[in-house]
Image (spheres, grey):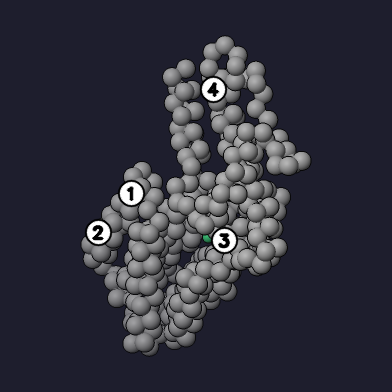
């Protein structure tokens, strides 16, 4: 029983905690009145939501109602609030548009039109596309190393950064998976998973940028660089998940890590005589320009594609080129090493 209660409480904390930050949209008294009314009656005007039909016997039967179907009820209650917020927002935005007013954010988000219950369909589709690009890139990287390039006698590749790129591929695909989930339904849990995965990926790719551009091949030196960086990234993820979801601080950390690695790659592309450095340049400049989209945060066009979705879209071709660079790098390093041994 205690277990049931604690699970119910945990779920309650995960899903029902009100979003703390207030945006212009949810500060609007008309919107607030609509949500309040909807939560009480389960309806907005003539439209009623199945998720808001709480059967009265479930609530008043002897014993606590949450002992019976705790998770289901909690989920339903959350779903009801989500539906109320969504339809009140849509109605409010139609009224505002009729008055010629620009869209505003609600609970930190632009007003998106749901498609089959999916909150931001464009961002979801683009996230899946990014995941597919990473998978394709990774696969061709593996094929190149295993079947096309010469291998050492112990069947391992000459390329010294193979394992690092494998980890990078897995972290990237993990990150895009949770991005797709988060943009489908934005709740506390999916948000944490998305943010944590993105931080882990950014931290690791910064490590990769340092190790590759400085040509660090000695295991002990790698560990010396990795330890403090990974410790910081881990601490930051734990902080976000279990202490405080500080959006401002997280943004600073992420932007710093992203700008640092772009700078490292750019400087390296400038000084090295890598045969594929134009690919590096294109990704660095493209990535830098794409970041402007995230800063210039415009509302969704027709309720679908906002700046964030477009930003995710720009990474699709960049990912393709990025894996092409990684493959070229593997070929280049292998040929260099073979030249030396001959
Ligand atoms: Zn996103």
Between 278 and 341, the one lying in front of the other is 278
- Mark 3 neighbour density, 10 Å: few (under 14) some (14–19) many (20 or more): some
Circles 3, 2 touching at the beta carbon (< 8 Å): no
Residue 299: x percent and y percent?
59, 66
The residue that disc 1 covers is 239
Front: mark 2 or 1:
1
Circles 1, 3 touching at the beta carbon (< 8 Å): no
Q: Is residue 97 left or right of residue 105?
A: right
For the residues marked 1 and 3, what is the alpha-carbon distance in whole angstroms?
30 Å
Which quadrant does the C terminus fall into? bottom left
In which quadrant of the rendered view does residue 133 lie? bottom right
Residue 87: x percent and y percent?
67, 48
* Mark toward the start of the polypeptide (2 vs 1): 2
Residue 174: x percent and y percent?
50, 55
- Mark 1 neighbour density, 10 Å: few (under 14) some (14–19) many (20 or more): some
**Residue 133 seen by the camera:** no
Front: mark 4 or 2:
4
The residue that disc 3 covers is 104
Helix, strand or loop at label 4? It is helix
**Measuring 65% from the left and 18% from the top, which residue is drawn there?**
57
For the residues marked 3 and 4, what is the alpha-carbon distance in whole angstroms?
37 Å
The residue that disc 2 covers is 228
* Mark toward the start of the polypeptide (3 vs 2): 3
In which quadrant of the rendered view does residue 120 lie? bottom right
Residue 97: x percent and y percent?
67, 63
Circles 3, 4 touching at the beta carbon (< 8 Å): no
For the residues marked 3 and 2, what is the alpha-carbon distance in whole angstroms?
41 Å
């Amino acid at each position: 029983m205690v277990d049931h209660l604690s699970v119910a409480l945990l779920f309650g904390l995960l899903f029902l905690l009100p979003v703390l930050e207030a945006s212009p949209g949810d500060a609007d008294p008309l919107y607030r009145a609509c949500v309040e009314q909807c939560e009480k009656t389960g309806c907005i005007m003539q439209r009623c939501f199945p998720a808001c039909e709480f059967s009265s016997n479930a609530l008043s039967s002897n014993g606590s109602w949450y002992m019976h179907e705790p998770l289901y009820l909690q989920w339903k209650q959350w779903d009801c609030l989500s539906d109320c917020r969504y339809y009140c927002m849509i109605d409010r935005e139609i009224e505002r548009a009729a008055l010629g007013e620009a869209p505003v954010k609600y609970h930190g988000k632009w007003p998106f039109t749901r498609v089959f219950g999916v909150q931001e369909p464009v961002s979801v589709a683009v996230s899946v596309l990014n995941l597919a690009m990473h998978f394709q890139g990774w696969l061709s990287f593996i094929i190149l190393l295993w079947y096309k390039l010469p291998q050492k006698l112990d069947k391992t590749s000459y390329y010294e950064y193979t394992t690092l790129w494998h980890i990078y591929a897995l972290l990237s695909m993990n990150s895009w998976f949770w991005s797709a989930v988060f943009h489908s339904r934005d709740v506390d849990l999916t948000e944490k998973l998305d943010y944590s995965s993105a931080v882990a990926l950014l931290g690791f790719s910064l490590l990769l940028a340092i190790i590759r551009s400085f040509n660090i091949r000695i295991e002990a030196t790698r560990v010396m660089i990795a330890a403090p960086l990974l410790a910081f990234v881990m601490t930051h993820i734990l902080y976000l998940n279990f202490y405080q979801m500080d959006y401002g601080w997280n943004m600073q950390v992420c932007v710093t890590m992203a700008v640092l690695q772009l700078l490292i790659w750019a400087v390296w592309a400038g000084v090295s005589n890598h045969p594929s450095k134009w690919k590096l340049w294109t990704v660095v400049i493209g990535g830098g320009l794409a970041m402007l989209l995230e800063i210039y945060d415009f509302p969704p066009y027709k309720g679908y594609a906002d700046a964030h979705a477009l930003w995710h879209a720009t990474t699709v071709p960049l990912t393709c080129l990025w894996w092409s660079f990684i493959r070229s790098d593997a070929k280049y390093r292998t040929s260099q090493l073979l030249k030396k041994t001959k």
